[in-house]
Amino acid sequence: SRSKRSDVGSTRYIQEGSHLPYAEIARNDGFSSDRLTMDAGLTYLHFSGANRGRRFKLSLNYSYGNVDALQSGRMDSIADGVADRRHEHYEETIPQVSGIWSLDASYIVPLSKKTGISLDLHANYWNVDNNECYKKYTDEGWERDERLSFHQKTDEWNLFGIFAIKNKWSDNINDGLALGMERREYRS
C-alpha cells in the first residue's frame, strides 16, 4: 500500500501594540508525507498419521514500512505587504525505515486420544532507522542544526518458546501444564 499527503497553510497577523514597520508577520507552513508499506507471508502445514495425528506448522512473515516526511516553515516580517525582513525559515525531514521479521513454528504430537504434547516457538526481529534532519535558513543558505537533528537506529530480537502437555478428561474438563522461556535483546 502507498499513500501520499500534503498540507500547506498560511497565516498573517499583526503584533499587538507594536508600531514597528515589520510588526506584521506572514507565516507559511507545509507538510508532506510519502508512506509505503509491504507485507509478505509464507505458511507450511504438514499432517501425518490418522485422525488427529502429528502436526507441524511453520509460518514466516515480513513487514516493511518506509515513511518520508518533510515539514517546512517560513515566517517573514513584512511592511506594507512586502517581505522585508526574514524572521525564520526552516525545513525538517523525517525519514523512517522499519522492518519486522516474524517466525512461528509449532509441533504437536498426540500420545493418546486424550493426551498430547506441543512445542511452540515464536521469534521476532524488529529494526527501525530514523534519520531526522533539521535545517535552518541563514544568510549563507540552508545549514543543518545539529542540536535539533538526530539519527536513531534500533534493533530488537525476541525469542519465546513454550513446551506444553495437555490432557482432556471430559468434554468440559481440560488440563494443561506448560513451561515457557523468553529472551529479548534490544540495542539502540
Image (spheres, rainbow, N blue to C red):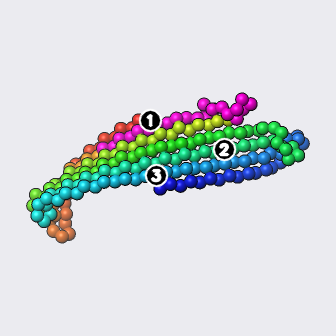
Please tell me which of labels 3 and 2 falls first in the chain.
Answer: 3
Q: Which residue is mark 1?
A: 188
Q: Is residue 186 left or right of residue 109?
A: right
Q: Is residue 129 left or right of residue 103?
A: right
Q: Is residue 141 magenta?
A: yes
Instruction: Tell me, yes or no, whether the two marked residues, 1 and 2, touch with CB atoms within 8 Å.
Output: no
| Category of crowding for the residue at label 1, using alpha-carbon neighbours closer than 10 angstroms: few (below 14), some (14–19), many (at least 20) | few
- Give, as a three-letter code, the residue at label 2: Ser
Q: Which residues are magenta?
A: 137-159
Q: Residues within 10 Å of mark 3 (few under 14, many from 20)?
A: some
**Which is nearer the N-term, disc 1 or disc 2?**
2
Q: Residues within 10 Å of mark 2 (few under 14, many from 20)?
A: some
Residue type marked 3: Thr
Tell me the mark number nearer the camera, choosing from 3 and 1.
3
In this rendered view, identify the residue nearer to me: 6 or 165: 6
The residue under label 3 is 37
In this figure, which residue is indicated by the disc labeled 2?
72
